[in-house]
Image: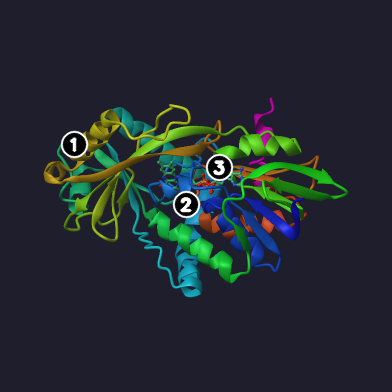
Amino acid sequence: MKSNHSFDTLIVGGGLVGAAIACGIAATGSKVAVLDGGDRDFRASRGNFGLIWVQGKGADFPAYARLSGISARQWADFSDELRDATGIDVGLQQTGGYDFCLTPEEWEAREWEMRQVAAHTEGEFEYQMLDQAELRKRIPEVSNDLLGASFSSQDGHVNPLYLLRALHQRMHHLGVDYHAAQAVQSSRRQDGEFIVTTQDADFHAQRVVFCAGLSNQRLCRDLDMHIPVQPLRGQLLITDRVPRFLPAATLQVRQTAEGTLQIGDSHEDVGLDESATLEVITRLARRAVRIFPHLAQVRLNRAWGALRVMTPDGVPIYHRSAEHPGAFAVSCHSGVTLAAFHARQLASWICSDVEDPLMTQFSADRFDV
Ligand SMILES: Cc1cc2nc3c(=O)[nH]c(=O)nc-3n(C[C@H](O)[C@H](O)[C@H](O)COP(=O)(O)OP(=O)(O)OC[C@H]3O[C@@H](n4cnc5c(N)ncnc54)[C@H](O)[C@@H]3O)c2cc1C
């Protein structure tokens, strides 16, 4: 006979997304439980690049541009809040971000994207297009091959593993009941409440939020939510420590607080395969050397692959079920960038019955055409 547990809110999945939302909801006084899977699950939160990145986000989707900006602008305060509450410094460096251009076509496409994002955010998104001479003044190590770069002062980076740890620590302080290795098998709505079943227990709640990464598609079907997420592999490399030379993050290489370089990141449509491959490692390393020739002498230490949680248009899904009020699904591929927004505005939206015109644009209904 299974045991029964009751909460106000159940969060399914304890990655960056589930943990941030759990913190936000628990802070309102709601009794929250997080049901997480096991170590063999695909977990984007443990394999990502750690960028807080606004540049280009939402060029084709104005609401996403606004949302990314809202989150990035709160990051400094959010990281202070996490440090004060948990003692964990997530290593935020928000000194801007560079995205390099190697060809005139890249430059032209980038400039268009930057203009779009600035227009969508009514000028709140600040950017500059830097030619090679300008770029060299800021990063003398860049190669002659580069035409230049786009730069935004709103971008930055953190240590994503410290972020996950801080969010879990914060959940603990806020009294969230975290259950590891409690993979959800099924969910149903009965007599006005949700019953979520794992191998060991039935969990009851008035509200359930699915944040199970790539498992969302399968799990959400039980409550008639269509959440079309797909894996997209990225590979990342780590070098030995090198003398500090990068004043800010770049989309291709970031220097960690410890001095190593993290080099990324590929976009590979290979299904549920998270292995690292020599071909992609070589390509990423060559590109890094093409941008920064002095890295040819630096030793690579390790590499890994991880699967992004991708929606068909690359924009987050924040879905509130109309059929089953109280059921939500959250899927996104920028869980670091959006962590501040998730812990604050998104958690408030989930707790509120009032619909927000900004948020309705992120419903999964946009794919039902
Ligand atoms: C290579 C790469 C680079 C990236 N770079 C960046 C970046 O620079 N900046 C950025 O903002 N984002 C980046 N991302 C994206 C970011 O990592 C993700 O958006 C974020 O980690 C998604 O978090 P999540 O909690 O939704 O998913 P996950 O981390 O996948 O977590 C899902 C959780 O659900 C659990 N789960 C699965 N099935 C069940 C079940 N049946 N029952 C209960 N629990 C279950 C799992 O165990 C896991 O803990 C990157 C991702 C990748 C792969």
Residue 250 position, x and y percent, is 31, 47
Residue 122 visible:
no
Q: Which residues are magenta?
A: 359-369
Q: Is mark 2 within 8 Å of ligand 1?
A: yes
Split into 4 quadrants, where in the image is the C terminus? Answer: top right
For marks 3 and 1 on the same chain, the one whose residue lies earlier in the sequence: 3
Q: Amino acid at mark 2?
A: Thr
- Establish whether ligand 1 lies closer than 8 Å to the Cβ of label 1: no
Q: Is residue 143 above or below residue 87?
A: above
What percent of the width, then of the height, locates residue 359? Answer: 66, 47
Amino acid beneath label 3: Gly
Mark 3 element type:
helix
Could one spot residue 156 in this view of the protein? yes
C-alpha span from label 3 to label 1: 34 Å
Taking the spot 27% from the left edge, 28% from the top edge, the residue there is 279
Task: Examine the structure image and report whether residue 365 is included in the region drawn in magenta.
Answer: yes
- N-terminal label among 2 and 1: 1
* Residue 36 in the image, given as x and y percentages of width and height: 58, 51
Q: Which mark is residue 56?
A: none
**Label 3 crowd (10 A; few <14 / some 14-19 / many >=20):** many
* Mark 2, residue position: 337
Residue 295 falls in which quadrant of the image? top left
Relative to 168, residue 112 above or below: above
Q: Nearer the viewer, residue 252 or 277?
A: 277
User: Which residue carries the number 3 mark?
Assistant: 213
User: Residue 71 location in percent, x, y?
Assistant: 52, 55
The reply to whether callout 3 and callout 2 are in contact (CB within 8 Å) is no
- The residue tagged 1 is 290
